[in-house]
Image (cartoon, rainbow, N blue to C red):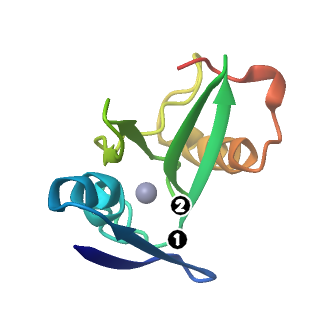
Amino acid sequence: MKLEVTKKINEGTVIKAEFEGKMGQVLRGANALLAFKGKCDLCQDNQCLLQVKSAKGFEFIEFVCTSCGARAQWGQYKDGGYFLKQWEKYVPKEGAQGSQQKDNAVIEAALDIMGGKLEEEVPF
Ligand SMILES: [Zn+2]
């Protein structure tokens, strides 16, 4: 079986991926992409990023919403392939509360996405 997935991640990025193999293999391989709706589950914004982080020898793949900072991590099947975990709301660091902090939170998330605050990397 052959499966071709084309997903628009944001205005400038379209992912084209090809999967080949047995049905189960192919669907497991493509699952995380298939489950992505092309937008953030929380704020419905369609400007997301796909990024990879490395920590302690592991790779973490996740979709990140550039609008609200929410993330959806990819989980890995034991026998290969990825699935998409639930979108998680971006939670600002302690001390930040109330709607007034929202803008800061988004800026912080954007900085985080761009690797702007590496010293505060939160372990998964
Ligand atoms: Zn969002």
**Label 2 CB sits under 8 Å from any ligand 1 atom:** yes
Residue 47, which numbered label?
Answer: 1
Q: Which image quadrant is residue 50 in? A: bottom right
Q: Is residue 16 above or below residue 61?
A: below
Whether residue 87 sits left or right of residue 71 in the image: it is left
Q: Along the polypeptide, which appears first: circle 2 or circle 1?
A: 1
Name the residue: 50% across, 46% down.
Answer: 62
Q: Quadrant of ligand 1?
A: bottom left
Residue type pointed to by label 2: Ser
Q: Position of residue 78 (x, y in %)?
A: 32, 29
- Of 114 and 50, the residue lying toward us: 50
**In the image, is 58 to the left or to the right of 110?**
left
Question: Which image quadrant: the N terminus?
Answer: bottom left
Please state which amino acid type lies under the numbered disc 1. Gln
| Residue drawn at 21 percent across, 60 percent down | 22
Q: Secondary structure at mark 1?
A: loop
Q: Is residue 110 above or below residue 56?
A: below
Q: Nearer the viewer, residue 4 or 10?
A: 4
Residue 7 at x, y percent in the picture: 41, 77
Q: Position of residue 97 (x, y in %)?
A: 50, 28
- Which-is-in-front pick, marks 2 and 1? 1
Q: Is residue 64 visible?
A: yes
- SS type, badge 2: loop
| Residue 41, horizontal then vertical, whole percent | 30, 57
- Local packing at callout 1 (Cα closer than 10 Å; few below 14, some 14-19, many 20+) is some
Mark 2 crowd level (few <14, some 14–19, many ≥20, 10 Å Cα): some
| Pointers 2 and 1 in contact (C-beta within 8 Å) | yes
Q: Which residue is mark 2?
A: 67
How much space separates mark 2 and mark 1, taking CA atoms? 7 Å
